[in-house]
Amino acid sequence: MAHGCASSAWTIGFCALHNWMLALFDQRAQEEAFATRPFLAPAPLAPAGRGVPTGEGVRLTGRWSWATGVMHGNWIIVAALCGPDDGIYPALALVPAGDIQIEDVWHTDGMRATGSNDVVITDVFVPGHRLVLVSDIYTGTAPCAGLHDAGTYRWPMVPALSLLAAMPALGGAERAAEVYAERLSQRVLAYEGVMQKDKTIARAHLAEARVRLRARTSSTTRCSGSSATST
């Protein structure tokens, strides 16, 4: 997909991976969120919010940047520091899109179509079943990990996110190499009157790019296999 549009690959890839993140939440949260198909949720994971305990949940307030896909989202997953002042813990919170405010700040030259604007949440109640402790995700003890035997529920989150983030860049680089090769085969150099494809240095640059891409593709494939089998 990144061969055609890196922004689309980035956004759709993360929206897909965030469905996996939702599968780590309590089953009640999943039933609520998956009731609306497709489930589309950005997930800015810097703990830029504060969840103050109240009743059976927390009152959540904060501002998060780089909420990729938020312009199409129907839910959002955000990281926050929750609990009392003397017992704060990082958690992920699942919030309906109707409870957030989108700040239009994403004015970039590249990847503009990801719509990665800021999100503001002000004193929104989040019930306890829509929270999952970050420590539980890291230790493979998230709520739904106890319901299913599949290793998928115990993937390490940061490597999974990093692997996904690398894929649009790799796809864009593959297409750039293809475009360069196409131009190389057609371009006549000014003042020399020879085809650029016949220049040794041009062929060397292309060969180096292709070798680097093959190495990175192979590395990504190995990492993908490792994540899929990790528990």
Image (tube, rainbow, N blue to C red):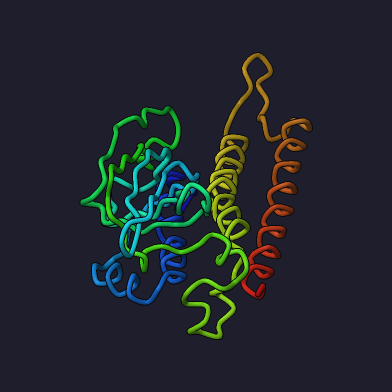
Give the residue displayed 43% in from the left and 45% down from the top: 5
Give the residue displayed 63% in from the left and 58% down from the top: 159
* Rendered image quadrant of residue 1: bottom left
Give the residue displayed 38% in from the left and 42% down from the top: 114
Point out the residue furthest to the left here: 98
Point out the residue furthest to the front here: 86
Give the residue displayed 48% in from the left and 56% down from the top: 91
- Who is closer to the viewer here, 163 or 158? 158
Q: Is residue 81 above or below residue 153?
A: above
The x and y percentages for residue 162 are 60, 53
* Rendered image quadrant of residue 26: bottom left
Point out the residue furthest to the top here: 191
The x and y percentages for residue 69 are 35, 48
* Rendered image quadrant of residue 224: bottom right
Tell whether 81 sits left or right of 69: right
The x and y percentages for residue 71 are 28, 45
Task: Quarter of the image for the C terminus: give it.
Answer: bottom right
Tell whether 17 sits left or right of 197: left
- Who is closer to the viewer here, 104 or 121? 121
Q: Is residue 181 above or below residue 132?
A: above
- The mark total stands at 0
The x and y percentages for residue 125 are 28, 55
